[in-house]
Amino acid sequence: MEAKAGDISVPLAVLLKREQSNMKTEKPDILYGEAGQKKKGEDLTFLKADCERLHETGTSPFSVFALFDGHNGPAAAIYSKENLLDNVLNAIPPKLSRDEWVAALPRALVAGFVKTDKDFTAKARSSGTTVTFVIIDGWVVTVASVGDSRCILESAEGSIYVLSADHRLDANEEEVERVTASGGEVGRINIAGGAAIGPLRCWPGGLCLSRSIGDMDVGEYIVPVPHVKQVKLSNAGGRLVIASDGVWDAVSHEKALDCCRGLPAESAATRIVKEALKGKGLRDDTTCIVIDILPPEKLSPPVKKPAKGGIKYIFRRKSYETLSDEQLADRGGSEPDVVEEIFEEGSAMLSRRLSMDYTTGNIFEPYNCAVCQLEMKPGEGISVHGAVFKSSSGINSPWDGPFLCVSCQEKKEAMEGKHALKNGST
């Protein structure tokens, strides 16, 4: 006997198996491990697999993993580790449904990163840090990143997906254009005779990155606005690798995954760090976090050779039409081993990042500051689009927003090169 899903004929036995499998694998098991070797002591990690959020009917679990690669001292990395998660969660309205919560994460991550940077630079410290910040809710993985640490995913089928962005000036021409348009100078170090050597850097300061938290001595055009990518894994799961540039400067994505395939998470992290040190020695802090997202009771990922086709930056859905009845049955009713992209945005403009449309409707407080969550009365906020919008009654309308408080508006304009902040950042 067969049942039809749309125009696709699927055996009823497969549908029943699939339903049973989905019931059993509603929430994955999260197994993780970390390893590192210190050169300067500026790499920090945050590992918390048992976070909880409130909703109308109780609580739901989620996990957070982050890597902070500091420079010019560890102060920015320490501050971000201690405050970033709270700032992100404070930007999410309480008691949302799961779909609303997942949809709110991209905007909340932008707000949390910018607030963390704003609060830290107010302390007049010159330290800075890259951040790769990962939130796992069920089979949905959301990654926010600034700097040159990276997060990659290997799906259960062996395909590799890049979930972070590289904000090295050498690797991102669009970021070079943005920095120079905002008033920064980008160039290499000049030596005697006028020859230019080394990577592209932003001056003053000589930073090789275009985005980070901190670095107030370089300039406000080094922005904390993260690239955010959100994907959904099949219930076959996958493996995440988060690592600092001490790893990625020495090994490729494929090599990192190949050298640890079949090992449990902690052993895998250790193996990747050893592989990186074998290649170039300990030139920088070298840190790696490995997270396995697995169907319940599956202790480790299967030992597989990676799929052909290299690293994937484009995500797509695979139709059941390409699978035979036997293949569907063999899967035990599970979903195909594909990764579905839900969201991706990398713009540095707050007017774009805070004004996203959600299919779930307006789930944010309409008059609170979209960055620091300061409660404001209608008419007090400044539209993120650049003007104080008021109706004939003198009161802002929700559709004129989102809105910023005065200090967050000053931060936004400084990031865009429109003026210098009072503390001296340019």
Image (tube, rainbow, N blue to C red):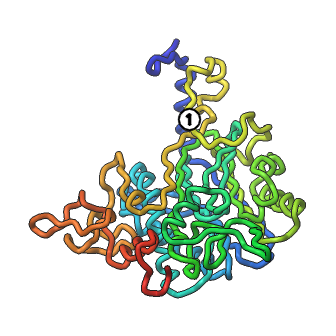
Report the side of 58 relative to 247 (left or right): left
* Residue 6 locus on image (x, y percent): 44, 20
In the depicted view, which residue is nearer to us: 145 or 56?
145
The residue shown at (72%, 65%) is 199
| Depicted 307 relative to depicted 362: above or below | above
The residue shown at (51%, 49%) is 344
Report the side of 278 relative to 361 (left or right): right
* Residue 70 locus on image (x, y percent): 66, 75
Residue farthest along the top direction in this orientation: 1
The residue shown at (81%, 49%) is 255
**Does residue 63 appear anywhere in the picture?**
no
Residue on which the image places disc 1 = 316
* Residue 421 locus on image (x, y percent): 43, 82
Q: Residues within 10 Å of mark 1 (few under 14, many from 20)?
A: few
Give the total of numbered labels.
Answer: 1
Q: Secondary structure at mark 1?
A: loop
Answer with the quarter of the image where residue 377 lies.
Answer: bottom left
Answer with the quarter of the image where residue 227 lies.
Answer: bottom right
**Does residue 357 appear anywhere in the picture?**
yes
Report the side of 228 relative to 275 (left or right): left
* Residue 180 locus on image (x, y percent): 54, 66
Answer with the quarter of the image where residue 166 lies.
Answer: bottom right
Report the side of 370 relative to 215 (left or right): left
The residue shown at (62%, 23%) is 328
